[in-house]
Image: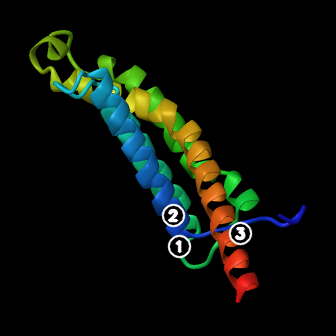
Amino acid sequence: MTVGIQEKVGVSDVTQATGLLCGTVAAVGLVYGEFNAVPGFVWPALVAVAASAVELGRRCWTKPAEASALAKLTPTFVSTAVGAVIFAFVMPALFPNEAYEHARWLVWIDAIFLLGGLLAVPTARLMLNIAERLARRRLNHGRGKGAQD
């Protein structure tokens, strides 16, 4: 690979990276749950993967973008992730004390906001890293094929 050339990451690379991350999260969840149940950390991780896929896919939807440009996450994405974490901490104050005892789904929603917000930015970085490697692999494979013809 030539030094100094940035890979152009396309929406197909982001989609493939999303599939790889979703598969990894699901596989880890199944192994951790001993194939009997899906543990609770899987849902927030999948929410973080989905949020990251939407953010990166939206930015390279019309044309492939350089990985360095995608690495600078938009302030809206970062502030939304921080807002989800803050909302998760404020959420218990919004409901009466008995609400969390009687409606167990509130605990799940709170956990999804907290862990999904905490995992959103690192997941976006990991997804971009995977998508960049996939773009590099596609580029090198295309060069190798053209050189043989």
Describe the element under mark 3 as helix, strand or loop: helix
Kindly identify which numbered label has been placed on residue 61.
1
Image quadrant holding the N terminus, namely bottom right
> Could one spot residue 47 in this view of the protein?
no
The residue sitting at 53% across, 73% down in the picture is 61
Q: Nearer the viewer, residue 114 or 40?
A: 40
**Residue furthest to the right:** 3
User: Badge 3 local density, few (<14 within 10 Å), some, or many (20+)?
Assistant: few
Three-letter code for the amino acid on which mark 1 is drawn: Trp
Q: Going from the N terminus, do you reach mark 3 or mark 2 first?
A: 2
Q: Identify the coloring.
A: rainbow
Q: How many angstroms separate mark 3 from mark 2 (CA)?
A: 22 Å
Kindly identify which numbered label has been placed on residue 57.
2
Q: Nearer the viewer, residue 98 or 82?
A: 82
Q: Say if mark 2 contacts mark 1, CB within 8 Å.
A: yes
Q: Nearer the viewer, residue 116 or 40?
A: 40
Kindly identify which numbered label has been placed on residue 140.
3
Q: How many angstroms separate mark 3 from mark 1 (CA)?
A: 22 Å
Three-letter code for the amino acid on which mark 2 is drawn: Gly
